[in-house]
Image (cartoon, helix red, strand yellow):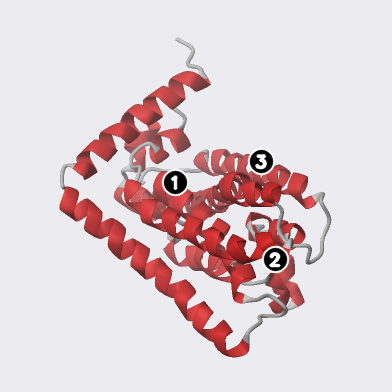
Amino acid sequence: MRRTALDFWRVFWFLAAKGMRERMQYKASFLLTVLFRTLSTTMDFVLIAVILARFRFIDGWDVFEVALLYGPVTLARSIFDAFARELERFEHYLVSGDYDGILVRPWPTVFALLARKVDVTRIGMALQGLVLIAIGASQALPAGTLSPAGLAYLVLVLPLLGAMILTAISMATAAIGFWVIRIDDLYVFTMYAPLSAAVFPLSIYPGWLRGLLHTVIPVAFAGYLPVLFLLGKGGSGWVLVASPAVALISLWLAHRLWLTGERQYHSTGS
């Protein structure tokens, strides 16, 4: 029987809802996990704010403008962590042989992998991102440096595009595991370090690194370039169209790499 995209999403949300119900059975644990994850990510921005309180600007960006950069990236990370975090655990599936069980299921393997876990505790990080955007907008809107339409783009569109780009980067990194198996350390260079860089204005980095973050690891389109234009700091309006295109192309290329690597897969011990 031929399955449609709607069938895939029905199964995905069924499994996601099942996972949510399991987490909510232990309400105290759930709330504490949300709280701790919120506090840990909040401290990162607090440190930035303390630095900016002393020096006022980072390459012409004040603390409120950095908040408008930090917020959408944080929201994108929370969406990725909630729905696609299993990609970062892919080395475990390869080493343990658990990926064999995914291969025999009658679903696309990426879909089956992501459906294994949806982490709703990431809601704390999402709330933090929204608060940071609100803080930045409280100054940018009255000053006229950000329009209401631009704010809507930052809240409703850019986090989704950022999550797609992060998913593409993670999927491509996981796909490399089909050849090299051990990829946990690789994630430091492809995901964690670029994410840390993306919450700052990319203009502070050397040219070779900016080029890398605009192309091979295109996190620039998940935050910096759209925010740069929306705040009137430079760039072209075309970036608002280019960002969705980059997100879609990145996902397509990452999936093609995944399918290519999957054909090279040999079960553990073989």
Q: Amino acid at mark 2?
A: Leu
In this figure, which residue is indicated by the disc labeled 2?
A: 212
| Label 1 SS | helix
Q: For the residue carrying disc 3, how many other residues have a C-alpha within 10 Å: few (<14), some (14-19), or many (20+)?
A: some
Identify whether 54 is placed above or below 150.
Answer: below
Q: Amino acid at mark 1?
A: Ala
Farthest top residue in view = 1
Q: Residue at x 46, y 43 (%)?
A: 265
Mark 1 and mark 2 lie on one chain; the one further toward the N terminus is: 1
> In front: 86, or 90?
86
Farthest bottom residue in view = 54
Marks 1 and 2 in Cβ contact (< 8 Å): no
| Label 2 SS | helix
User: Is residue 106 at all visible to an observer of this figure?
Assistant: no
In this figure, which residue is indicated by the disc labeled 1?
A: 84
29 left or right of 16 in image = left
Question: Residue 101: which quarter of the image?
Answer: top left
In this figure, which residue is indicated by the disc labeled 3?
A: 248
Q: For the residue carrying disc 1, how many other residues have a C-alpha within 10 Å: few (<14), some (14-19), or many (20+)?
A: many
